Image (cartoon, rainbow, N blue to C red):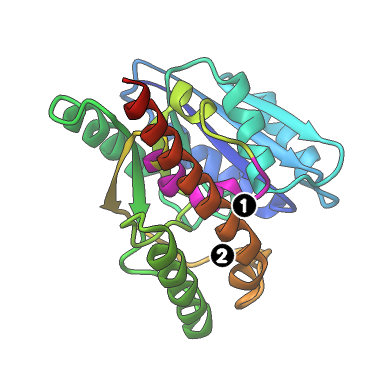
Amino acid sequence: MKISIIVPVHNEADNISALIAEIVKAMNGAEAYEIIYIDDGSNDDTAAVLKQELQHVELLRVIRHQRSCGQSAAIYSGVKVAKYPFIATLDGDGQNDPADIPRLYEVLVQQRKNINNLWMIAGWRNKRHDSAWRLFSSKVANGVRSRLLGDNTPDTGCGLKVFLRDEFLSLPYFDHMHRFLPALVLRSGGQVISEPVNHRAREHGHSKYGTLDRLWAGITDILGVMWLQKRAKLSEASEVERG
């Protein structure tokens, strides 16, 4: 297993050290790996904690955005500098379990023997540890996205994913694209499999999102992805006609 683990963070100082230790433990059997933290313009002690971790975690790399650019930009920055052909993404709040990464990697590698265009394994938090209201709002948002985009993915908001680096970089980039990765992969001719993963309660800090704001803020993005899907279908049709 040769894999780059991307962790975008914004004001997550209290969660960094414990999560890095968990990642190192989970990757104990990996042939080669790296951990790339992207500090997305944090204004707490995130930068200081990461600087300290650099002193004793040899495989850790840190990228800093001078201002907050958003989670999609942070992930994209990490993937661009990644060394390895496989990428794993984790939320920096500690709710994703790094121990799931080797299993998702194996699912991707094994299933690609039967599905040549399999690009991504998407984590599915089928047993979430969140407030009832956050669970409800997430269910609504996922339902709307799935119905409108037809991505057949029960949990597009899960930060834990394993995918192919080059194929990810071939996707159209835009702000908030991380919320629509399964739909974008399908649009580009790839396939996605959802796999149940562990989900933990947040121990430190608080969510950077409100209740239904991800749904309302994402309406324009959903319309944009629908336009991209339609454009891809029109391109396919024109190619058939030329053939």
Q: Give the main secondary structure, helix, strand or loop, of the magenta stretch.
A: helix
Query: Which residue sits at x=46%, y=81%?
Result: 136
Q: Which picture quadrant has residue 191? A: top left
Q: Is residue 174 left or right of residue 161?
A: right
User: How many residues crowd mark 2 within 10 Å: few (<14), some (14–19), many (20+)?
Assistant: few
User: Above or below — where is 3 with respect to 24?
Assistant: above
Residue 157 seen in render: yes
Which residue range is magenta in the image?
Answer: 174-186
Mark 1 or mark 2, earlier in chain: 1
- The x and y percentages for residue 10 are 72, 50
Describe the element under mark 1 as helix, strand or loop: helix
- The x and y percentages for residue 224 are 60, 53
Describe the element under mark 2 as helix, strand or loop: loop
Query: Which residue sits at x=80%, y=39%?
Result: 48
The residue that mark 1 highlights is 15
Residue nearest the observer in this picture, 162 or 203: 162
CB atoms of marks 1 and 2 within 8 Å: yes
The C terminus: image quadrant: top left
The residue that mark 2 highlights is 203
- The residue sitting at the bottom extreme is 132
User: How many residues crowd mark 1 within 10 Å: few (<14), some (14–19), many (20+)?
Assistant: many
- The x and y percentages for residue 123 are 36, 51
Residue 134: image tag = none
- The residue sitting at the front extreme is 241
At label 1, the amino acid type is Asn
Residue nearest the observer in this picture, 169 or 65: 169
User: Above or below — where is 166 with respect to 236?
Assistant: above
Q: Which picture quadrant has residue 234? A: top left
Query: Which residue sits at x=66%, y=67%?
Result: 209
At label 2, the amino acid type is Glu
Reply yes or no: does residue 178 show up in magenta: yes
